[in-house]
Amino acid sequence: ICDAMWSVWVVVLQAVTALRMDECEPTALGMESGAITDAQITSSSSFDRQSVGPQNSRIRTELASGAWCPKPQIQSSSYEFLQINLENTYIITAIETQGRYGNGTGREFVAEYMIDYLRPGSKWIRYVNRTGHTIMTGNSDTTSSVMRVLNPPLFASKLRIVPHSKQTRTICLRAELHGCLHKDGLLYYATIPGGSRVGNVDFRDTTFENTDLYTETGIRRGLGLLSDGYIAESSPFDESNQNGSWIGWSRHHTEGMVTLLFEFDQLRNFSEIVLVAYGRLSNIDVIFSTDGTNFSLSSQISSLSRSSNSSSKRNDYRIPLHRRMAKKIRVTLWFANDWIFLTEVHFSSGRLYNEPIGYNLYFNESVTTITVPEEPIFTRKVAYGAIGLLASLTLLMIVFCIVLMRRRKSDDKFNVFEDDIRKSLIITQIRGKPATEVLSSRQPPPHIMSNLYSTTKTTSTSLSSKSTSPKFGTATWNDFHFPPPPSAPSDKNHDGNAHHYTSTLVRDQVEKVIKIPASSLLIGADLGQGKHTIVRECYVASIGNVAYKTAKDRDNFYARNALVDELKTLTLAKNPHIIRLLATDDSGGLLLELAVEGNVKQYLQSQSVGVPVSQLLGFCADVCEGMRYLESLGLVHGHLSPSNILLDENLRAKVASPRGPSHHAQLRYSAPESILKNSFSSNSDVWAFAVCCWEILETSCTTVPFESFSSTDIVENAQRMLAGYDDLAVLTFTECVPRGVRNVFVRCFEIDPQARPSFAHISYFMSKYYVIPEK
């Protein structure tokens, strides 16, 4: 039934929706008729204000001496202008000019001119047409009017006509503007990246405005091909369409993901987005910002393409936006083919003349739909009675589907989740004996937490929820480590040859590590400590100053096991962004590269002056490179946190203490599958990395993640994530983080581990939007 409902919905949209330029019927905007008042017409200068001032520049009208005439003569370097203030933003499709007739006495006209314009939030923009020219051809006499169609049209609230002449001459001007009111409200967009160029084929946005406006990540904002109202009808690979009709992105350059950011004039109510594409999109994510700054994950609408349409044809993708309200909209496109192209993006929306009540601006649930790409439709004629009937049927089926889905969700929600938990119990060893506890999806009993975790008090943090704040009790901060997991699965479950090869490789590498007698070590001050280990400053005559890591209790099995696993990992991981293993001693201690600035938390908390965001990003980029290397070797870090991110004398961040999946992280840095199912992988490392980046970038390590949450709260939040609830507590990144980097960090918090980006993917995007400075 729901599939049938969706099909009807698509038909209705096809019937009643047209693209914006179809709706714009250009008319004269009022220079001749007087709809544009004298107060709206200004100029840089006038030869005589009364006789040839800007108020006399109305086309086909003889007022005073018959036109506007600037005071100086015009030459190629002049900047004199007639300015028209439109008060609202208009689509300007043509400009009409005329010289000064002056009842037969006039001899002056404008042979060439340029156009400058602006709209809310911009500086003056020089108009460039589709062929790349800025100078428009004007008049050749004083009597005839000449209309120049603007291709592409421009979007402006103020416009200047700037006379131009290669030879010094006196000019006078009358003018009219043609166009229509800009109802969409779109002011700017940005594409990340800005299109691809491969060899001589350039599919970048060549008509994009030179606005000198940029996002915080350095991406130019403006309008171009995606908003010009022109829709290409043939293949982008036809020579006639190249460099003027399509923007294209190569999968090789983008890894199959493109982000579009759209900015509007005010808070608007959106019903639909249309993307006119060439090729097949596999997924479209739309997310909304009501204040123009924060994008609520709970507002996201995801559209999955169900069609198997060929990638070598034009498709119109239409996604219902369910009356979402926003000032900015971010659209992320996913594609699997070699190329994807866009020629137009259009939103259907309405202005909100009265600011809505606050609670209406937030959304309690995200929406996923199935999108069927349409065949292009150029003419739409529909009987209104049929539309009304289809709309009524659609509404009834929507209500029916919602009721049915809610009943199913209500009946099955807890049972399904509790069955899943029973299959994946948290198992730990208490005094040598296995112990198991089932954590209820409704509310974990507090006594279970006290049995499993030790507690330490600290301060508070900020976070956002996908709806209202979770109904947790009074929170105290608990900083604890996971209990050790059960022993590793038997080798019979794995490929024997591969295991033998890996074991042999590790053994050979460990045997090559330099051994230093413990008696030759000069032990210094404590540098830091973990649950089972302690790190001290140390001097070795043959090496120099090092960090010496050893077990707090030499008889503790877990401490010894942690050092052995770290030794095995470090013998394989040799990378400038990972702390180097220099030697071992005969007691099992590790002699490591000394990071003189300590861990990143110690360093940031010691700074009296705030550390620049660029430097904080550098720390995150360094860590990402180290984790990317571990990922490439198939190694899991297992417990990444700021205390395991160390800084050397050049302030280069290095990853420390990689021990693998047998040694758990602190709870606050752990992915939900790690908390509830003891599942640790490179995917869970990605989650931990994003939490570390949040703490570094958003708080400079002065606040811990989920600071106001107790251990019970955090576990319950993880349960709700895996159960598919909506009221989730999540960490969010603010505008201090470049948008491109922020987007990929947000994806690190996907609940499905397989949906998170790899470290290679994160590294690619960080290098794209942030260049690590030389150190």
Image (cartoon, rainbow, N blue to C red):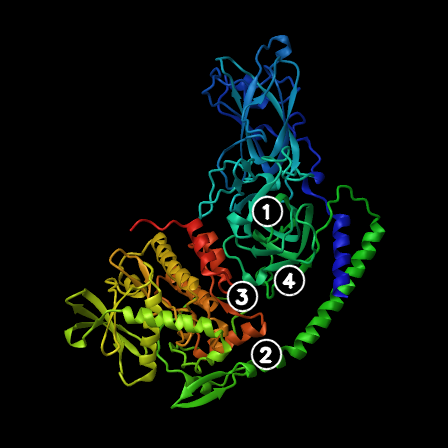
Camera-near label (4 vs 3) is: 3
Contact? badges 1 and 4 (CB < 8 Å): no
Distance from the alpha carbon under mark 4 to that under mark 3 = 18 Å
Distance from the alpha carbon under mark 1 to that under mark 2 = 40 Å
Expressed as whole percent of the image width and height from the top left, the position of residue 646 reads 30, 64
Q: Quadrant of residue 449?
A: bottom left
In the picture of the structure, the residue carrying the numbered disc 3 is 754
Q: Earlier in the sequence, mark 1 or mark 4?
A: 1
Q: Which mark is residue 124?
A: none
| Residue in the picture at 45% in, 71% down | 498
In the picture of the structure, the residue carrying the numbered disc 2 is 417
Name the amino acid type tagged 3.
Answer: Gln
Binning the other alpha carbons within 10 Å of mark 4 as few (below 14), some (14 to 19) or many (20 upward) gives few
In the picture of the structure, the residue carrying the numbered disc 1 is 339
Name the amino acid type tagged 4.
Answer: Thr
Expressed as whole percent of the image width and height from the top left, the position of residue 684 reads 46, 69
Q: Secondary structure at mark 1?
A: strand
In the picture of the structure, the residue carrying the numbered disc 4 is 368
Q: Secondary structure at mark 4?
A: strand
Distance from the alpha carbon under mark 2 to that under mark 4 = 21 Å
Q: Earlier in the sequence, mark 3 or mark 2?
A: 2
Name the amino acid type tagged 1.
Answer: Trp
Distance from the alpha carbon under mark 3 to that under mark 2 = 19 Å
| Residue in the picture at 81% in, 54% down | 388
